[in-house]
Image: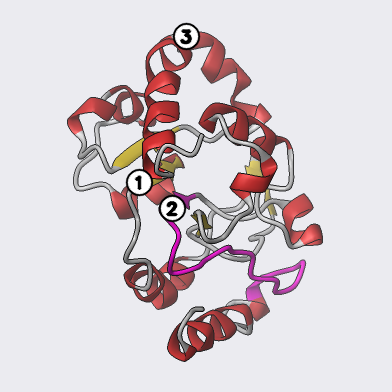
Amino acid sequence: MPSKSFNSLIDSVRACTLCASELADGVRPVLQCHPKARILIAGQAPGIKVHNSGVPFDDASGDRLREWMGIDNETFYDETQIAILPMGFCYPGKGKSGDLAPKPICAQTWRNRLISSLPNLKLTLVIGTYAQDWHLPFQQKTLTDTVRDYANYDETILPLPHPSPRNNIWLKRNDWFARDVLPELRARVSKGLGGLQ
């Protein structure tokens, strides 16, 4: 059972309204977190479908991410196995070329406290530039170079592109990702989960 202090922290995050005046679609923090979690998925922010359902990665991006990881829905949504903490917990709204960036105050307020409450993490999957800016000790000039450089990071952290269908062109242009990175991702996920997969 999580401690009272952990439950209090999660309740505070779920009740957060720091950005309420800036969120056209309203406040709905979406996260998955438990002290026993062994893998952390550090993403960007919920999309509108996830905002409406309240379930992390409940969309095409989630389908692809689970395929990349080589795990089923049951494992993915087992909070004692996998924590999901985007850089912004609420849907930031629509911009001219896609969703807006996550609100920085979200990570500034909650991220370190939440991550410090996850003592059993074996692997952090760092999805997209916003999460990579926060989690990686160094980055290359582009996301492509950062992901390609995965072997130069600690084996407990793995940078990834966003699994969104909007990245289909990137995936087609960078076939090394499926060839080189995905087998490594699946191996690390299996190891992080204690060889359960």
Label 2 neighbour load within 10 Å: few <14, some 14-19, many 20+: many
Residue tagged 1: 123
Does the image show residue 96?
no
Q: Amino acid at mark 2?
A: Leu
In this view, 25 is above or below 182 = below
Q: Determine whether the residue tagged by mark 1 lies in a helix, strand or loop.
A: strand
Task: Give the residues drawn in magenta, as a range.
Answer: 22-42
Residue 139 placement (x, y as % from top left): 24, 38
Residue 190 placement (x, y as % from top left): 43, 35
**Residue 39 part of the magenta-drawn span:** yes
Does the image show residue 10?
yes
Return the disc, 1 or 2, that comes first in the chain's sequence.
2
Q: Quadrant of residue 92?
A: bottom right
Residue 66 placement (x, y as % from top left): 61, 35
Q: Check if mark 1's residue and mark 2's residue have beta carbons within 8 Å.
A: yes
**Residue 1 part of the magenta-drawn span:** no
- Specify the label residue 40 is tagged with: 2
Residue tagged 3: 175
Label 3 neighbour load within 10 Å: few <14, some 14-19, many 20+: few
Gap between marks 1 and 3 measured at Cα = 24 Å
Return the disc, 3 or 2, that comes first in the chain's sequence.
2
Gap between marks 1 and 2 measured at Cα = 6 Å
Prevailing SS of the magenta stretch: loop
